[in-house]
């Protein structure tokens, strides 16, 4: 009983520390924006000009990153694209209407439509930008701009309370808070750097509109918004290059790097996969599969073999690295791991149990191997050949 309580407390503490780590940078930029606004309001012309240029520079860098990478950057890309368009529209409204911009149709559309778009982008599944879904999303943004231009006056005819929250109508402020609430709840469960960054970036846009009646409010908070997306995008790229989505699992790039710099001359790998993984994935779904793989990796790391685990280039396969071990001893270790996993029961967070088996292909680094990919390639071919006849086995490449 005490062990379970201790394990639960340790798990909770690890989760809290992980949340703090992912929130630290975007929260710091958000706080700096607040301090800069309240300490230097109003900004002098030179400072405001520098921050104005900095916004476009930061926005351009993030958009460039998203367009160049073209992989799983749709969420920050569309958030930044929409925020940048709103920044341009907002400054245009202030130049056109002067102090009366708050009653203009364009500003009211920004106040009400922007949070709804940001909510959509936040819960959007990460995808490549060159997909049909992203194409239709872009069309949707263009249709909104067309609606503002040709039918925008409709929004000015709606009944509003004679109470403003800063520079925006009270109804818009309530909508913003209702939008930010589910996002803040979601990041407490999915504390990734991207989701956390989007929450703080969206909060900056809210403050930027709320204090838009001052030049410094618009510039400072929209710049903070762009900087948060820039920094979190770069950090996420670094994380994705070096780490897997699973805890204590390195990426394949990290495996190749460590093989050249950190591994000893003598090492053996065990390439393994959950048997009948594709069928199981259709039954339990992607989220539960990640949870299952996390439990599996945790169980493997409990063995006293000093195992390092990495994701293979094929996502369904993982790599165990046994340093300073030859194939003979690694075969014994792998057989023990296979036997224990087959006898284990894994319990999901919803209380349901599942039993699985794994198959392992052992491959030793030899003098003839030019690089680490030769070792993993040999193991992969051996594993696929073994799967043609059987599963829940250990084979040697």
Image: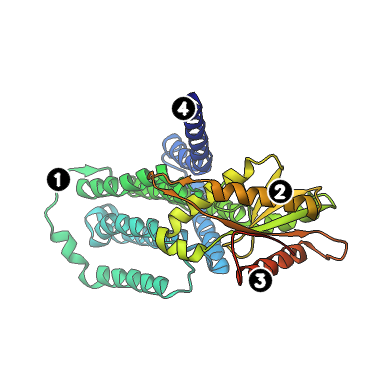
- Dot 2 falls on a residue whose secondary structure is helix
Q: Which residue is mark 1?
A: 162
- Dot 1 falls on a residue whose secondary structure is loop
Quick one: label 1, few (<14), some, or many (20+) residues within 10 Å?
Answer: few
Distance between mark 2 and mark 4 Cα atoms: 31 Å
The residue at 51%/43% (across/down) is 22
Q: Position of residue 302 (x, y in %)?
A: 62, 40
Q: Which residue is mark 3?
A: 385
Q: Position of residue 64 (x, y in %)?
A: 55, 65
Q: Nearer the viewer, mark 2 or mark 1?
A: 2
As rendered, which of 350 and 338 lies closer to the eye?
338
* Residues marked 3 and 4 touching at CB (< 8 Å): no
Name the quadrant of the C terminus. Answer: bottom right
Q: Earlier in the sequence, mark 3 or mark 4?
A: 4
Above/below status of 42 relative to 146: above
Q: Which residue is mark 4?
A: 5
> As drawn, is 317 to the left or to the right of 229?
right
> As drawn, is 249 to the left or to the right of 213?
right
Distance between mark 2 and mark 1 Cα atoms: 73 Å
Q: Which residue is mark 2?
A: 333
- Dot 3 falls on a residue whose secondary structure is helix
Q: Nearer the viewer, mark 1 or mark 4?
A: 4
């Amino acid at each position: 009983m005490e062990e379970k309580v201790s394990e639960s407390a340790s798990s909770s503490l690890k989760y809290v520390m992980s949340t703090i780590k992912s929130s630290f940078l975007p929260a710091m930029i958000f706080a700096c924006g607040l301090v800069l606004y309240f300490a230097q309001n109003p900004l002098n012309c030179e400072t405001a000009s520098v921050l104005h240029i900095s916004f476009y520079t930061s926005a351009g860098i993030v958009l460039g990153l998203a367009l160049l990478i073209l992989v799983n950057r749709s969420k920050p890309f569309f958030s930044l694209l929409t925020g940048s368009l709103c920044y341009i529209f907002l400054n245009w409204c202030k130049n056109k209407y002067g102090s009366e911009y708050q009653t203009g149709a364009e500003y009211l559309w920004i106040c009400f439509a922007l949070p709804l778009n940001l909510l959509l982008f936040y819960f959007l599944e990460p995808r490549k930008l060159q997909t049909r879904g992203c194409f239709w999303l872009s069309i949707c943004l263009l249709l909104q701009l067309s609606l503002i231009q040709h039918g925008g006056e409709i929004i000015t005819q709606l009944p509003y309370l004679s109470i403003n929250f800063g520079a925006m109508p009270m109804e818009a402020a309530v909508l913003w808070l209702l939008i930010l609430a589910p996002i803040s709840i979601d990041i407490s469960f999915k504390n990734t750097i991207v989701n956390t960054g989007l929450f703080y970036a969206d909060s900056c846009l809210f403050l930027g509109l709320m204090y838009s009646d001052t030049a410094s409010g618009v510039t400072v908070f929209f710049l903070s918004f762009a900087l948060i997306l820039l920094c979190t995008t770069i950090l996420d790229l670094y994380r994705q290059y070096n780490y897997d989505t699973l805890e204590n699992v390195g990426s394949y790039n990290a495996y190749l790097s460590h093989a050249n710099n950190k591994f000893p001359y003598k090492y053996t790998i065990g390439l393994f996969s959950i048997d009948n993984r594709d069928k199981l994935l259709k039954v339990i779904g992607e989220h539960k599969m990640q949870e299952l793989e996390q439990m599996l990796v945790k169980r493997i790391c409990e063995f006293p073999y000093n195992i390092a685990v990495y994701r293979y280039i094929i996502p369904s396969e993982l790599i165990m690295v046994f340093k300073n071990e030859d194939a003979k001893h690694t075969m014994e270790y792998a057989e023990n791991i296979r036997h224990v996993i087959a006898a284990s029961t894994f319990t999901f967070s919803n209380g349901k149990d599942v039993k699985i088996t794994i198959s392992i292909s052992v491959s030793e680094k030899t003098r003839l191997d030019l690089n680490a990919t030769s070792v993993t390639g040999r193991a992969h071919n051996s594993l696929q050949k073994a799967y043609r006849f059987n599963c829940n086995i250990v084979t040697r490449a």
